[in-house]
Image (cartoon, rainbow, N blue to C red):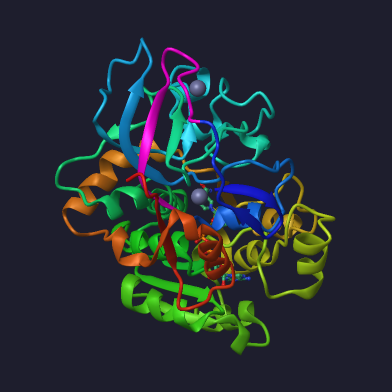
Amino acid sequence: MTYRGPYKIRVEDKPMPVIEHPNDAVVRVTLAAICGSDLHLYHGLMPDTRVGHTFGHEFIGVVEQVGSSVQNLQVGDRVMVPFNIFCGSCWFCARGLYSNCHNVNPNATAVGAIYGYSHTTGGYDGGQAEFVRVPFADVGPVKIPEWMSDEDAVLLTDATATGYFGAQLGDIAEGDTVVVFGAGPVGLVAAQSSWLMGAGRVLVVDHLDYRLEKAREFAHAETLNFAEYDDIVVELKKQTDFLGADVAIECVGAEADGNLLQHVTGAKLKLQGGSAVALNWAIDGVRKGGTVSVMGAYGPIPNAVKFGDALNKGLTLRMNQCPVKRQWPRLFEHVRNGYLKPADMVTHRFPLEEIADAYHVFSNKLDGCIKPLILPSAA
Ligand SMILES: NC(=O)c1ccc[n+]([C@@H]2O[C@H](COP(=O)([O-])OP(=O)(O)OC[C@H]3O[C@@H](n4cnc5c(N)ncnc54)[C@H](O)[C@@H]3O)[C@@H](O)[C@H]2O)c1
Ligand SMILES: [Zn+2]
Ligand SMILES: [Zn+2]
C-alpha cells in the first residue's frame, strides 16, 4: 500500500525490507487492519505524510528474518506487533510510557514512533504490506498464544488495547455513569471495557445508527444519536439528573462532526489541529470533578477547546497514545475468558490488492463498515 496524496491510495511494488540494525526483524504480514487513525492520514490531515509512505500500524505475521542480536524471536514465529515502536530501556519506557519512547523518533519529542504513521511519528513504513521491518524486535512483538485467533490478535495490536486504555484512564469507580463519544472500534471497546471496570451505566454517542446498534448489541450500552437532538450536552444532562456523567471517554478525534465552524476550521482548512467538537462535548457532558479520557487523535494545536470550562469544573483530563504492550497481559486474560471479543467487530475483509476500496468503504462508512481487515497475498 502506498500513499499518493489525500484520498489516493495505490498498490505498488517496493523493495523488500531489510535488516538495518542487529535488533531488527523482517515480518511477513499475514493479517492487517485499517484504523480510524489511518483515515486522518488518508484525508491528508496529518502533517508530513509523504507520497510513497506505506501505512498500517495494526498487523500480525510470521518472522521471516532476524538480525544478529535478536534473542526472543526465531524465524517462523507467529507474532503480533504493537503499533508503537519503542526501545524498552529509556526513561519513558522504563515507566511503561512506551508510546512516548525517547529513542525512536528523530522528528518529534512529544510522541514516540508508530508504524506507517507519517514522518511526524518517525517515518517507519507500516504493515499494510506483504513484508515489514520491525525495529527493536526483542522489545515490541510477542508470539501469538496458540489459543488466540488471528483476528483477535490483530485487533489487540491497537483498537482493543486503545479502547481498554481509554476506560482505564477514565478512573471509573463502582457504579459510575460513563459516556463514550464515538462508536467506532475504539469507542465500542471503551464502552465494553467500562463494564469490566465497574461502571453502573454506559452511554454511547454517535450519529451513525448502524454503529449505535452495534454499541447496543456488542457493548450492551445505551445509545444517543446526536443528530436527533438540538444539543446533545443538554440531553446528556437530562439523562444524568442534570449533573453530567462521571466519566467521558472521547473516541472520535480531529475529524469530529456536529459543529460546522469547528469542522471547517479544524478538519477542512486546518487552521487548528482538528475539530474539537467531541472533546468539547466530553468537557461539557461530565459533571464537575469528573474525568475526561481522550483517545481521539489530534494535531498539536486545537485552539477552540473549552479549557477554561474544564478548569472551572475541576475536571481531570487524561490522554495518550496507547502504550499497547502494557495492556496485553490483562487483555489476553479477558480475551481468553471471553470477556472481550475483539473479532466480533470485524465487518470486512479485503485482499491487499483492493486496499484502495477498503479505505473508501471505511472512510465513507459504507456497507455497515466497522472494522476492515487486509489480507496480503503472500500470506
Ligand atoms: N490514542 C490512541 O492510541 C489511539 C489509537 C487508535 C485510534 N485512535 C483514535 O481514536 C479515534 C477513533 O478511532 P476508530 O478507529 O474508532 O475510528 P472510526 O472512524 O471508526 O470511528 C469514529 C466514530 O466517531 C463518530 N463521530 C464523529 N463525530 C462525532 C461526535 N461529534 N460525537 C460522537 N461521535 C462522533 C463517527 O461517526 C465514527 O463512528 C480516532 O481519532 C483515532 O485516530 C487513537
Ligand atoms: Zn490506530
Ligand atoms: Zn524508549
Quarter containing ligand 1?
bottom right
What residue lies at 49% left-to-right and 64% top-to-bottom?
246
Q: Is residue 249 left or right of residue 106?
A: left
Q: Quadrant of residue 307?
A: bottom right
The foreground one among 62 and 320 is 62
Q: Position of residue 36 (x, y in %)?
A: 54, 58
- Decide whether residue 24 is among the magenta residues: yes
Numbered marks: total: 0
Tell me where residue 263 appears, x and y as whole percent.
Answer: 76, 68
Say left or right for 238 vs 352: right
The relative height of residue 325 versus residue 287 in the rendered view (above or below) is above
Where is residue 144 drawn, in percent x and y? 24, 39
> In the depicted view, which residue is nearer to us: 287 or 363?
363
278 relative to 376 in the view: left or right: right
In the rendered image, the vertical position of residue 343 relative to residue 105, given as above or below: below
User: Is residue 21 found inside the magenta-colored segment of the image?
Assistant: yes
Which of 308/101 is in front? 101
Q: From what the image shows, is residue 287 above or below residue 271?
A: below
State the residue lying farthest toward the front. 13
Examine the rendering and report whether any part of residue 140 can be seen.
Answer: no
Is residue 236 visible to us here? Answer: yes
User: Which segment is the magenta one?
Assistant: 16-33
Residue at 33 percent across and 15 percent down: it is 70
